[in-house]
Image (tube, rainbow, N blue to C red):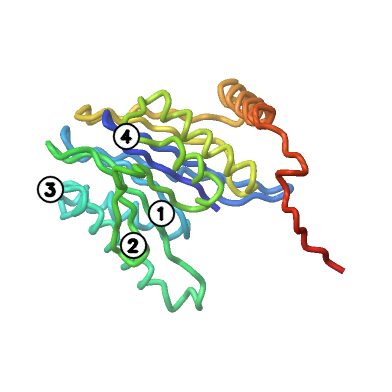
Amino acid sequence: MTYGLAMRLQDGLVFLADTRTNAGVDNVGTYRKQHVIAPSPRRLFVIQSAGNLATTQEVLDRIRRDLANGGEGLATANYLFEAALYLGRLSREVVDGHRDGMRGSDATATFILGGQVEDEDPEILLVYPEGNYIRASDELPFLQIGETKYGKYLLEMAATLDVDAPTATKIALGSMMSTARANLSVGPPYDLAWYGRDSFRVDAHRIEADSPMLAELQKTWERQLRASFGELRGFGRDDLDRSPTHIG
């Protein structure tokens, strides 16, 4: 399982992805699921992936091949949505090429594509296995792939366009920790990336499982969450249903 998320801010973009590919008592595998590609000085893309790992790797290999051979793709797209359609087309081609050998197994992959092309605004798009895409709204300026349900509430509550990068980073990590706490197949190391508007460069960081910052954030998060229950008023008999349903 995978969890990846991207946030669109007024000042840029925030990306966070885990690296766990499988998890068992004695078998934990990791693989980078977040990739930065800069085909030219004013063209930068961040790709996050979830789903079939073999499909993801072949899609990335085809992207690199097209860049090396001067073909159409990330080097020629004039808009981010054109790059998203190219990514979706590659993904479908890879899946279709191996469909007979998969014998009904799911070989699909889902991607988040973010970045900036020339003078266009920075953007994030979610590319579905079918090849189409959606973009994040101004009301909910984030996208998720993989194991999305456990970390979605925090993003819906706190992720807004006007939050600054440090705050957005804490929100993203809180969403990731909530997911990792609920699902063993999501876990560190985490890949964090920040893209500033018109910078055409990414500040990327690998957060290891033994990171003091991660431990402090986890401890603070749990302490504040428990403390919030103490601020709620108590419930008495008058607050409860006066006509309870009896079972048995």
Identity, as a three-letter code, of the amino acid under mark 3: Asn
Identity, as a three-letter code, of the amino acid under mark 2: Ser
For label 3, the residue is 78
Within 10 Å of disc 3 (Cα), the crowding (few <14, some 14-19, many 20+) is some
For label 4, the residue is 161
Residue 183 sits above or below residue 98 on the image = above
Q: Tag 1 or tag 4, which sits nearer the N-term?
A: 1
Identity, as a three-letter code, of the amino acid under mark 1: Gln
Within 10 Å of disc 4 (Cα), the crowding (few <14, some 14-19, many 20+) is many
Viewer-nearest of discs 2 and 1: 2
- In depth, the one of 158 and 38 nearer the eye is 158
Q: Tag 1 or tag 3, which sits nearer the N-term?
A: 1
For label 2, the residue is 91
- Residue 57 image label: 1
- Picture coordinates of residue 189 (x, y %)? 55, 35
Q: Tag 3 or tag 4, which sits nearer the N-term?
A: 3
**Pointer 3 with pointer 1, Cβ within 8 A:** no
- Picture coordinates of residue 246 (x, y %)? 82, 64
**Pointer 4 with pointer 3, Cβ within 8 A:** no
Viewer-nearest of discs 4 and 1: 4
Residue 217 sits above or below residue 21 on the image = above
Number of marks in the image? 4
